């Protein structure tokens, strides 16, 4: 038993999740648990109350959903056995989408209820029998007070984004709910920050909670200089990459991070074809041995470029990296800190260069919140050819921007047409400011040559 407990958990299999969940996780493309998942899943599975301090983007939703789905297991009875409460309709919908994704091979019945439309359809759905309910506080109480929700079988209650819930004045609804639900239950509370109101709520709501915290890591190490380029599309990202790597003396050992295996493949193929030096790609589709060999060769200095996805690169210790290039902005925002932490080690001057499309600028802002600083922007170098964004890519980005806006403002209706003008102006603005003499480039170059 003791041996078992000491065994380090590093994969989803280690959580002893059932096959249905593991299959869904694999299909969702999650290769390894995120830090909050590593910490929280074993504790939640063991039945503890949890106070989780984590921001969106850390994988916190799956951290509470996976053990919940294990516990609920299958459809049973008519009344909800678990309720997840979130402050906005958009967040409720998002959580429910996550359940749909992860519970797809189970028969668990789940439903999202929220205001903004009549309750009739939602009541009908509740009456059909439900296992997990995701709700905004007001609509939940409304259905309860009408007698349409029976809460006597509730075993788990989860409050997500508790700080936002307090800001929006939902405390009375939450208190009222706590009075009417069974006392013997598991409680989980997640919040990005811990203002007094949330501390107070957690004291009322949780019993002997275990605190799980993903602290935004300290500001990136001082030896790393950071720069951000706004790049309109994938094709132009490749073009910018090619421009930057011309300086082979300065960029002599580079890790290029991409968001997906597909992009990792495209970038490494491109570099290989152009013969800019040895390239290896590491991502989930590469066998463990291949990855290890690539890493060793990179460490040994035989390889100039390592193209990697975050998951593949996690836990791998590589030092002496001259540059980290974020070809895509990471969606798990903490990964930005992990990525750039690989450069600038051991007193070496390091540099982290990030490429972001207009759609990715949303994630840049979230990253900046975590690192508590603005990443300095540079205009695109004049000589880089800027390609027009293909129609499909443009549509995909416009859709993503709409999704982001809706995330922050559930009443946002969508505005594809806004996109073009704004994009162009941002881009042009950057271009005019360009002063090659004082560019980031020169700065890192100097640092490189000052070394020894
Ligand atoms: P959240 O913090 O829950 O909003 O999650 C942020 C994003 O990370 C979502 O798009 C999730 O689908 C994704 N995600 C969650 N867990 C993992 C994982 N283990 N590996 C990769 N992506 C994940």
Image (spheres, rainbow, N blue to C red):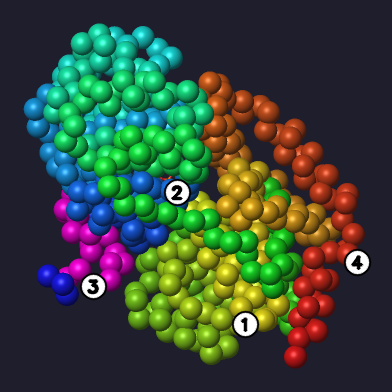
Which residue corresponds to the image point at 77% horizontal and 45% vertical from the top-left? Answer: 427
CA gap, disc 2 and disc 4: 41 Å
Residue holding disc 1: 346
Of helix, strand and loop, which one carries label 3? loop
Mark 4 or mark 1, which has the lower sequence index?
1
Is residue 7 on the magenta stretch? yes
Q: Is mark 2 within 8 Å of ligand 1?
A: yes
Vertical placement of residue 307 versus 108, above or below: below
Q: Nearer the viewer, residue 354 or 315?
A: 315
Q: Which residues are magenta?
A: 4-20
Q: Residues within 10 Å of mark 1 (few under 14, many from 20)?
A: few
Residue, disc 3: 7
Q: Is residue 285 above or below residue 51?
A: below
Circle 3 residues within 10 Å: few <14, some 14–19, many ≥20 = few
Label 2 CA crowd tier, 10 Å (few <14, some 14–19, many 20+) = many
State the separation of the CA atoms marked 3 and 2: 25 Å
Q: Quadrant of residue 250?
A: bottom right
Q: Which mark is residue 54?
A: 2
151 on left or right of 371: left
In percent of width and height, residue 330 lies at: 53, 55
Of the numbered discs 3 and 2, the one sitting upstream in the chain is: 3
- Nearest to N terminus: mark 2 or mark 4: 2
Vertical placement of residue 26 versus 256, above or below: above
Q: Is residue 410 magenta?
A: no
Mark before the other along the chain sequence, 3 or 1: 3
Residue 96 occupies quadrant: top left
Mark closest to the chain's N terminus, 4 or 3: 3
């Amino acid at each position: 038993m003791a041996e078992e407990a000491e065994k380090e958990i590093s994969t989803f299999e280690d959580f002893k999740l059932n096959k249905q969940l593991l299959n869904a996780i694999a299909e969702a493309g999650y290769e390894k648990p995120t830090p909050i998942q590593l910490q929280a899943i074993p504790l939640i599975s063991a039945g503890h109350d949890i106070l989780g301090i984590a921001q969106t983007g850390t994988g916190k939703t799956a951290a509470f959903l996976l053990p919940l789905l294990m516990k609920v297991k299958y459809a049973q009875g008519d009344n909800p056995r678990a309720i997840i409460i979130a402050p906005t309709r958009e967040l409720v919908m998002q959580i429910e989408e996550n359940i749909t994704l992860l519970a797809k091979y189970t028969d668990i019945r789940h439903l999202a209820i929220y205001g903004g439309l009549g309750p009739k359809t939602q009541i009908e759905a509740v009456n059909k029998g439900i296992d997990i309910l995701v709700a905004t506080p007001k609509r939940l109480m409304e259905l309860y007070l009408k007698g349409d929700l029976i809460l006597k079988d509730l075993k788990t209650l989860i409050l997500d984004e508790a700080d936002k819930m307090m800001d929006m004045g939902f405390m009375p609804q939450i208190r009222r709910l706590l009075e009417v639900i069974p006392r013997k239950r598991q409680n989980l509370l997640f919040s990005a920050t811990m203002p007094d109101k949330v501390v107070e709520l957690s004291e009322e709501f949780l019993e002997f909670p275990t605190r799980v915290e993903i602290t935004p890591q300290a500001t990136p190490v001082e030896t790393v200089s950071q720069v951000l380029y706004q790049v309109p599309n994938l094709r132009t990202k490749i073009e910018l990459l090619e421009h930057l790597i011309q300086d082979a003396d300065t960029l002599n050992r580079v890790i290029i991070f991409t968001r997906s295996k597909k992009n990792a493949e495209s970038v490494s193929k491109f570099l290989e074809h152009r013969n800019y030096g040895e390239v290896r790609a590491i991502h989930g589709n590469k066998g463990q041995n291949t990855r290890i060999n690539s890493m060793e060769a990179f460490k040994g200095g035989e390889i100039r470029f390592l193209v990697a996805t975050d998951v593949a690169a996690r836990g791998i210790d590589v030092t002496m990296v001259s540059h980290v290039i974020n070809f895509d902005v990471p969606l798990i925002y903490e990964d930005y800190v992990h990525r750039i932490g690989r450069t600038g080690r051991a007193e070496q001057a390091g540099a982290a260069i990030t490429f972001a499309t207009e759609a990715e600028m949303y994630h840049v802002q979230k990253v900046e919140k975590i690192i508590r600083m603005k990443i300095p922007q540079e205009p695109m170098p004049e000589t880089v050819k800027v390609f027009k964004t293909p129609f499909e890519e443009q549509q995909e980005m416009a859709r993503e921007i709409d999704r982001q806006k809706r995330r922050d403002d559930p009443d946002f209706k969508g505005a594809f047409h806004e996109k073009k003008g704004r994009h162009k102006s941002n881009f042009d603005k950057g271009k005019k400011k360009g002063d090659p003499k004082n560019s980031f480039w020169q700065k890192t170059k100097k640092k490189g040559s000052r070394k020894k």
